[in-house]
Amino acid sequence: MRKAYVFLSLVAVSVAVAMRVGAQTQPNTIARIITIKVKPDQSTQWEGALKRLEAWEHQQNLPGTTYVWSVISGEHSGDYVLGTFGHNWKDFDAMDLQRDKVGVGKEIGETVEPYTESVTFSYYAFQPDLAVC
């Protein structure tokens, strides 16, 4: 229970900070990236738990698409990165409110959290004026 509280607290703080920083960004340019460090030798269990969580979320008709990568080289090798893209700030408010209503925090605590060592949330604003083509 304490881990779920810490996890949800981190989400709330990340959103609050990101909202202040990103207030001037263009619409549909915000991405939320979650980096997950899995406990040693627990990747197979974590992946299975993530699949169960995703199936449960689908049954709850939760909106949004999340892409998942496994880091295969470099400093964060072995970590997982989850990302959702093309959002406005209000999208996260609506998604998180709906997720809270169906009890996603509890489900996370019962599925992926036992295999998770740490979670980091980051928000990114796409800068189309700086894109190199």
Image (cartoon, grey):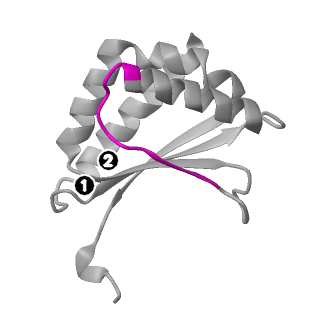
The x and y percentages for residue 79 are: 67, 49
Left or right of 133, for residue 111? right
Name the quadrant containing residue 73. bottom right
The C terminus sits in image quarter: bottom left
Residue farthest along the bottom direction in this orientation: 133
In space, the residues marked 2 and 1 are separated at their CA atoms by 6 Å
- Range of residues picked out in magenta: 59-70
The x and y percentages for residue 42 are: 78, 33
Return the residue at label 1.
22
Return the residue at label 2.
18
Identified at 39% across, 40% down, the residue is 14
Instruction: Check disc 1: other Cα within 10 Å, few if <14, some if 14-19, many if 20+.
Output: some
Tell me whether circle 2 and circle 1 mark residues in contact (CB < 8 Å): yes
Instruction: Check disc 2: other Cα within 10 Å, few if <14, some if 14-19, many if 20+.
Output: some
| Nearer to the camera, 33 or 54 | 54
Identified at 63% across, 26% down, the residue is 49
Q: Which mark is residue 110?
A: none
Q: Does residue 112 sit above or below 73 in this rendering?
A: above
Identified at 15% across, 58% down, the residue is 27
Circle 1: residue type: Gly
| Nearer to the camera, 14 or 96 | 96
Identified at 33% across, 18% down, the residue is 100
